[in-house]
Amino acid sequence: MVQDPGIARVVADLEESEFASGVGAGRWSVINFAFPILDFVISAMDAEGKVSEVGFRAELTNFPAQAPMVWIWDHANKCRLAAEKRPKGNSRIAKAFQHWTEDTVYRPWERKTGPHNNNAGNLPHLAWRPDRRLSFIFQDLHAILNSNARTRPIRAAA
Amino acid sequence: MISSDSPAIGQASADAMEMRMSDIEGGEIAVQETGEVVLLVKTGLREERRVSLKHGDRIGAIVEVIARERDVTVEEMVIVCEGEVAELTLDSSVSPDYPHKRRHHVHHRSLVKVIVFYGAKEAAHEFKRRETVDEVFDWAVALKEFGIDPAMQGEFVLVLHGQKDEVPGSEHIGHLAGHAKELKLDLVRGDIANG
């Protein structure tokens, strides 16, 4: 039986140093991997400093040639997270996790979002490429989910 | 006894030796115990190595190897565990409960002058090489000179000066600066997909 080469690539990405570093530091973790489905959580901090975990599901058919399709996911109920339960806050968060036609994560690297309104073409630095690793997506989601916590009082320069 | 692989970019794993995800039959990951302790040590932006250690080995041995390679003294170097503020003491040793799954970083002890540009404005501040982009961000968005509304601070990101790629918040200043004494970053609104 011929094994899908995408499986080996996903496993390599899950062992890659940036990815492993995020696991070790508690920034994210994998719940389950059964190709082509990868279930994972990303840690998030809100403006009050409260830490939580946000679930995601990635579909990785033809990875890495084809961009991952990623949903914000309710792992307990095995379905997309209801819109009213999704992270709220600044416009980056609101847009990334908005409810839209395809209802995938709305970031240029995402399979459905990339071609939508030519997002991948307009924002190539955020678009998926086969040479990118899964850690690119995890870092992007982690940065957005923790952007609410990045508010600081104004002060004069030292 | 300490042994160090040559840099293995993109292949190293913090727990690669103790828990190797090697059985991928059917896409299912199986965890295999191999009993070795390996530290992933980052020494540059694209320079990492896996260092094999035994219980009782000194952490300082890692610094000694890298200092020798760079032709500097051990006292000029510092080693930190990712996510920790304090540097590790060179005499600390690897024990069974040592957090070996967390990446370690080795830096020169010198400071980096970080210049952040925001539109036509700029500000500079010295940071330790082990400090992160997140720490620079926290300093920059709170500057009175930049005048960023606290409610809007979460919309911003730091990118390398003149570029568009967002720099991960956990990245160390020292790795971005390399051997330079100065690092330039732009504070910009994070890109949002249109739709």
Image (tube, coloured by chain):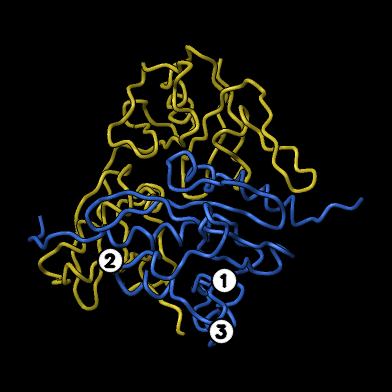
Chain colours: A blue, B yellow
Which chain contains the residue that carries disc 1? A
Residue indicated by mark 1: A110
Position above or below: A108 against A121: above
* Left or right: residue A133 compared with residue B95: right
Residue at numbered disc 2 = B154
Badge 2 crowding class, 10 Å Cα cut-off, few under 14, some 14 to 19, many 20 or more, is many
Q: Residues within 10 Å of mark 3 (few under 14, many from 20)?
A: some
Could you say which quadrant of the image residue A44 lies in? bottom left
Which residue bears the numbered disc 3? A116
Q: Are marks 2 and 1 in contact (CB under 8 Å)?
A: no
Tell me: B137 left or right of B194: left
Query: Circle 3 marks a residue in which chain?
Result: A
Is residue A127 placed above or below A4 in the rendered structure?
Answer: below
x, y percent for residue A104 = 54, 72
Residue A63 screen position, x and y as percent = 70, 62
* 1 and 3 marks on the same chain: yes
Secondary structure at badge 2 equals helix
Instruction: Tell me what residue is drawn at x 37 percent, y 69 percent.
Output: A93
The quadrant holding residue B164 is: bottom left
Outermost residue, bottom side: A117
